[in-house]
Image (cartoon, helix red, strand yellow):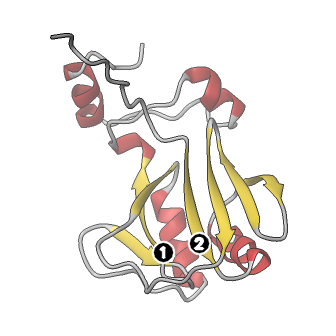
């Protein structure tokens, strides 16, 4: 019997969020985050996240998210908290910085310095963030997996 080959999942290229109106979605997310727009059409927009992106697609039909969410990595978590407050967006209860966008997409904000995730130095440089660092705990987690930055 031959062993079947399996592909190895290596990361997430993009997340697609269903929203109402594309212009409204870009305005909403623009109040919270600095971003580069990769492309836009009547029914979609693409926001760069360095070597990844978020796709905004018109046409949300399902109810708001409850536990289902995605974690968006940022360089300054407290700046997001301030922008949410200034925009009148309610932070959801719990130990994380979670919120719902106007279309019911649940987003958790995660700080780059404290997670087991790293961008290559050339990607950080291209994003204008060459000096981001990791906490000791994040470096330990990466070291334990033989993935610590050099």
> In the drawing, does residue 1 fall left or right of residue 52?
left
Q: Which residue is mark 2?
A: 18
The image shows residue 118, relative to residue 115, as above or below, that is above
> In the drawing, does residue 68 fall left or right of residue 31?
left
The image shows residue 56, relative to residue 63, as above or below, that is above
Residue 12, position as x, y percentages in the image: 48, 41
Residue 61, position as x, y percentages in the image: 54, 83
Residue 135 or residue 115, whichever sits in front: 115
Q: Secondary structure at mark 2?
A: strand
Residue 60, position as x, y percentages in the image: 58, 80
Q: Residue at x 19, y 21 (%)?
A: 144
> In the drawing, does residue 106 fall left or right of residue 102?
left
Whether pointer 1 and pointer 2 mark residues with C-beta atoms closer than 8 Å, the reply is: yes
- Spatial CA span between label 1 and label 2: 8 Å
Q: Quadrant of residue 47?
A: bottom right
Residue 55 or residue 25, whichever sits in front: 55
Q: Residue at x 59, y 72 (%)?
A: 18
- Name the quadrant of the C terminus: top left
- Outermost front residue: 1
Residue 115 or residue 12, whichever sits in front: 12
Q: Which residue is mark 1?
A: 105
Q: Which mark is first along the chain, 2 or 1?
A: 2
């Amino acid at each position: 019997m031959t062993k079947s080959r399996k592909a190895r999942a290596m990361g997430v290229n993009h997340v697609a969020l269903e929203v109402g109106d594309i212009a409204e979605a870009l305005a909403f997310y623009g109040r919270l985050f600095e971003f580069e727009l990769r492309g836009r059409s009547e029914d979609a927009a693409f926001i760069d996240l360095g070597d990844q992106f978020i796709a905004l697609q018109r046409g949300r039909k399902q109810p708001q998210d409850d536990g289902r969410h995605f974690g968006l990595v940022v360089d300054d978590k407290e700046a997001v908290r301030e922008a949410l407050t200034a925009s009148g967006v309610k932070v959801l209860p719990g130990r994380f910085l979670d919120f719902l966008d106007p279309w019911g997409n649940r987003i958790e904000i995660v700080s780059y310095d404290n997670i087991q995730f790293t961008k290559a130095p050339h990607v950080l440089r291209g994003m204008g963030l060459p000096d981001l660092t990791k906490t000791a705990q994040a470096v330990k987690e990466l070291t334990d997996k033989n993935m610590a930055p050099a």
